[in-house]
Amino acid sequence: MLLRSCCVYGAGILCVLLLIAGIAMALAQVFQKLINNRIKEQVVLENGTEAFSVWRNPPPPVYMQFYFFNLTNPAEVLEGDKPFVQQIGPYTYREYRPKEEVKFMDNGTRVAAVNPKTYVFEPNMSRGSEDDIVRTVDIPVVTAMEKFKDTLLVSRIISDVMKAKGIGLFRTFRVGDLLWGYEDPLLKELKQFVSDDHFGLFYKKNGTDDGDYIFFTGKQNYQDFARIDEWNGQSALNWWSTEECNMINGTDGASFHPIITKTEKLYIFSSDLCRSTYAQYESDVSVRGVPGFRFVPPSEVFANLTINPDNAGFCVPAGNCLGSGLLNASVCKEGAPIIMSSPHFYQADNKFVQDVLGMNPNKEEHETVIDVNPSVVIDEESAEKLYAVVTEANVIVNIPFIVISVGILLGVIFIVFMCRQQTPASSEQQPLLSS
C-alpha cells in the first residue's frame, strides 16, 4: 500500500513538473515572439532611431588591409618559367565610411545616400610602410596594349615609347603610389588617347564614393532593412549577359535585417566585385562573448559554368568562361584586364595554384566570413577578402617587340589582395595583426 502511494505521489510530481516545463517553454516562445515583433517594429531607417544612427555611421572600427605579391624572378618569367612570388604586408588603413547626402523618399519607405570611404594609414597595425618597394606587373602597360591592340598607330606609339624609355612588362613601385596613384610615363605619352595619365589601384578612391544608392528602410517589411533598391540610378547591372547575373541583390554588407535564421542566404552587392554574392550559414560562433552565426560564401558562388550553370552570365564575352574561382571583371574596370579571385586562388581550380609558385590557399586565412548576431542588424566581425588579378590573354600578339623576341606566352599575373575587417568597438585599440 505504501509503495503504491509513493508511485502515485511520484507520478503526480512528475506530471506537475512536466506541466510547469511545458508552460515555461510556451511562455518562452511567446516572450521570444514578442521580442522579435518588437525588434521588427523598431529596426527601421528613420530619423531618431538607433538603427538609423548605426547604419548612417557604423560605430565599430573598419580596417582595410592590403597584401602585395612581390615577383622575385622577372627575368626567368620572361624566359618562360613560372612566376615565383612572396607575399608582403599587411598595409593597414583605418576606413571611415559614413553615409552622406541622406534623403528619405516615398513616405519613408526608401532612402537615398552615398557612401564615401576615407583611408588613413595605421603604421602600428602594418608590416612595413607606404615607402616599401614591390615588383609586379605594370598594369597601365598591359591595359594600354589590350585597349589599343587593334589600333595600329597607337600600338606603334606604345612600342616606340616602351623601347625609348626602357619600359617592360614588370617594374617596381612604391606601395603608396601603387595604391593611391602616380604619374605613369607611358600614359603621359599617350595623353591624347587616354583620359588620365595617372594610375593607382585605388586612385581617386580615397575620400570618394562608389556611386548613388537607394536603400529600402524596412518600414514595409523588416527583411528589406538596408536592402539596395538602386545603384547609380539602375535597379540592375548591365555588364553581364544574363538577367540573373545582373541582379542587384542584398545590402552593401555593412548591415543586415534583424532576426536572421540559419536557413537563409545573406545577399551582398559589391561594387568592387561588380556583382552580387551571397553567404550561407556555416556554424555558431562567439564574438567577444556574444553568440552569433557565421556565414560564408559557398564554393558554387564562383564556380565554373559546368558546376553552377547560373554563373553562365559571368562568362564574358558570352561563352568565354574561366575556371572555377575566377571572375573576369574587365567589363566593369574600364577595359583593364582585371580578374578577381579569392586570395591565393582559394577555392579556384588547382591549375591556377600550380601555375604560380608561392601560392598557399587555406580556409583559415583566405575565406570570406560574416559573423552576425541573429537579432542585431550590424555584423559583429567580418572579414571580406578580395583578390585582384591582372591577366594578359595573349601577350605574343599584344607585346610583339618584347615577346616574340623571347618567345613568352604569359597567362596570369596577380597584384594584390585586400582584406576588410570590421571589429567590435571594444577592440578598437587592439591590433588585428602584430607588427
Image (cartoon, rainbow, N blue to C red):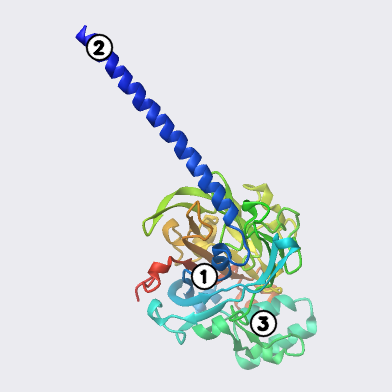
- Mark closer to the chain start, 3 or 2: 2
SS for callout 1: strand
Residue type pointed to by label 1 = Met
* Residue at image point 55% right, 79% down: 118
10 Å crowding of disc 2: few (<14), some (14-19), many (20+): few
> What residue is disc 2 on?
5
Secondary element type, mark 2: helix
Q: Nearer the viewer, mark 1 or mark 2?
A: 2
Say if 334 sits above or below 32 in the image.
Answer: below
- Where does label 1 land, which residue? 418
Q: Amino acid at mark 3?
A: Phe
* Residue 176 in sight from this viewpoint: yes
Q: How far apart are labels 1 and 3 at the CA level?
A: 34 Å
The numbered mark, 1 or 2, whose residue comes first in the sequence reads: 2
On the image, the x and y values in percent for residue 15 come to 36, 22
Residue 254 makes an appearance in the image: no
Label 3: which residue? Answer: 401
Amino acid type at circle 2 is: Ser
Q: Nearer the viewer, mark 3 or mark 2?
A: 2
The mark that comes first in sequence, 1 or 3, is 3
Separation of marks 3 and 2 at Cα, in angstroms: 103 Å
How many marks can you see? Answer: 3
Residue 357 location (% of width, % of height): 46, 66
**Where, quadrant-wise, is the N terminus in this rendering?**
top left
Q: Position of residue 390 (x, y in %)?
A: 60, 71
